[in-house]
Image (cartoon, grey):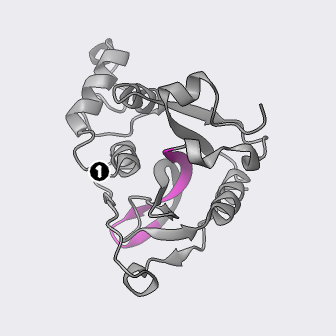
Amino acid sequence: MSCMPWKGDKLKLESELQAPLQIYHEKQRRELCALHALNNVFQDGSAFTRETLQDIFQRLSPNTMAMPQKKSMLGNGNYDVNVIMAALQTKGYEAVWWDKRRDVGVIALSQVMGFIMNLPSSLSWGPVKLPLKRQHWICVREVGGIYFNLDSKLKMPEKIGSEEELRKFLKYQLRGKNCELLLVVPEEVEVHQRWRTDL
């Protein structure tokens, strides 16, 4: 079973809330979904740049020029989890890999800044969807007490809803093959494992 698109509510913030929420939602460019997911987690378009991630990639893979098959050699993106983890560490955060065999009910949501998920995603050539899938990084986080899917391939943020609805969303996504979940937490939370309620 592959990951299925979540049928969340389309965002209608102005009509649902007294004051409109300001949500930063970076859109997909090239193969820079890791960059978009990071900036969406931090709700800041200048949190990371392509150059910053490329520098991290070069530091982690110093022999890249000798191995031209490396995907990020030219700075086109498609960064792996190591780049995401190192980038988060530069801001004092950690990525905690979630074992999807565990119940998401034990995640202490108040201790988690956001979620970065790696999901299979359809490829397109212009308006035509191809019968191929590639892995894609997305961000899910809370803004104004509501959880949103901030996938950079979406036209606008997709409302997930409450904590209970977030847990349903995460369970649904993690049922699929090749779906991974990272909890983005401050270093101190990771050190003391306060992201868990089952300790």
> Within 10 Å of the Cα at label 1, are there few (<14), some (14-19), or many (20+) other Cα atoms?
few
Q: What is the residue that sits farthest to the front in this orientation?
A: 18
In the rendered view, does 175 fall on the left or right side of 145?
A: right
Q: Main secondary structure of the magenta part?
A: strand
Total marks in image: 1
Q: Residue shown at 56%/40% (left/top)?
A: 183
What type is the residue that disc 1 sits on? Arg
Please provide percent x and percent y for residue 8: 57, 73
- Whether residue 138 is visible here, answered yes or no, is yes
Please provide percent x and percent y for residue 161: 57, 69
Q: Is residue 59 above or below residue 142?
A: above
- Rendering quarter of residue 108: top right
Q: Residue shown at 32%/32% (left/top)?
A: 72
Q: Is residue 27 above or below residue 14?
A: above
Quarter of the N terminus within the rendering: bottom right
Badge 1 marks a residue whose secondary structure is loop
Q: Residue shown at 27%/39% (left/top)?
A: 48
Depth order, front residue of 72/7: 7
- Rendering quarter of residue 20: bottom left
Quarter of the C terminus within the rendering: top right
- Whether residue 179 is visible here, answered yes or no, is no
Depth order, front residue of 88/181: 88
Please provide percent x and percent y for residue 190: 57, 27
| Label 1 sits on residue | 30
Q: Is residue 159 above or below residue 80?
A: below
Please provide percent x and percent y for residue 55: 25, 24
**In the image, is residue 115 part of the stretch drawn in magenta?**
yes
**In the image, is residue 126 part of the stretch drawn in magenta?**
yes
Depth order, front residue of 193/88: 193
Magenta segment range? 113-129
